[in-house]
Image (tube, rainbow, N blue to C red):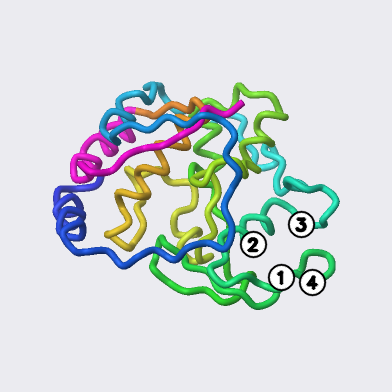
Amino acid sequence: MINNLRRAAIAAALLVVPIAAPTPAHAHDRSVPRRTLPISAAVRLLPLAAEVRDGYQRTSFKHWNAGKNPTDGCNTRAEVLIHEAVDPPQILPGCKLTGGRWWSYYDSKWVTSASALDVDHMVPLAEAWDSGASQWTAARREAYANDLNAESSLVAVSAASNRSKADQDPAQWLPPTISVTCRYLSEWTATKLRWGLTVDAVEQEALTQLTGSCPDTNVTYEPAP
């Protein structure tokens, strides 16, 4: 469980004027009305249920698929990298990416090689399974695993930070950069609300305690089709 020291550190970090976040070269399309509400209210909307890992296999979520444009040779992973690049990479035949520069917000690091990045599912596939995706159709799990229609669903970060996170929820893992904690909690909550996923009691308690240090943070989400 995250303790009060982490909450104090978050509060202290929020007192520091943040450095402007790097702006991606492109933006996702938005065609569905969004809902925005304070993070504390958003956390209260998350349904409570026990987690069930039975039957989980990573292959239950087909990824990466052909993305938004099946004819361009770029799969979902590549499309996320292209979208989130601060300095766009060159796109070679077969959608091989060369050059470019990315900001890994979990650990506040610049990354200059696409191969050094992971595309993280904000709510990991195993956690999604535990939280309700086990009852979905294969098509809906594929849509979840390749969700390019919400900023928070997929995020390009350093491979090291993603592998440190693994399939853990915010009660077990938070980004090492304390100043982004509120952003991370907002995006986690938005993803669960978007897809109608549940939280267990330990996760709910952690979210409730931690978001108490994020009074000016909102959650914006669009219910998935």
Q: Residue at x 53, y 25 (%)?
A: 132
Q: Earlier in the sequence, mark 4 or mark 1?
A: 4
- Secondary structure, mark 3, is loop
Q: Are marks 3 and 2 in contact (CB under 8 Å)?
A: yes
Image mark for residue 31: none
Q: CA distance from mark 1 to mark 2?
A: 8 Å
Image mark for residue 97: 1
Q: Which residue is mark 4?
A: 92
Say what amino acid the circle numbered 2 marks.
Ile
Q: CA distance from mark 1 to mark 3?
A: 10 Å
The residue nearer to you, when weighing 67 against 59, is: 67
Crowdedness near tag 3: few (<14), some (14–19) or many (≥20) residues, C-alpha within 10 Å: many
Report how many numbered discs are placed on residues in the image: 4
- Secondary structure, mark 1, is strand
Q: Are marks 1 and 3 in contact (CB under 8 Å)?
A: no
Crowdedness near tag 4: few (<14), some (14–19) or many (≥20) residues, C-alpha within 10 Å: few
The residue nearer to you, when weighing 29 against 77, is: 29
Q: CA distance from mark 3 to mark 4?
A: 10 Å
Span of residues in magenta? 201-225
Say what amino acid the circle numbered 1 marks.
Leu
Q: Which residue is mark 2?
A: 82
Looking at the image, residue 209 sits to the left or right of residue 192; the answer is left
Say what amino acid the circle numbered 3 marks.
Cys
Please tell me whether residue 209 belongs to the stretch shown in magenta. yes
Percent x, y for residue 202?
Answer: 30, 33
Q: Which residue is mark 3?
A: 74
Q: Are marks 1 and 2 in contact (CB under 8 Å)?
A: yes
Q: Earlier in the sequence, mark 4 or mark 2?
A: 2
Q: Earlier in the sequence, mark 3 or mark 4?
A: 3
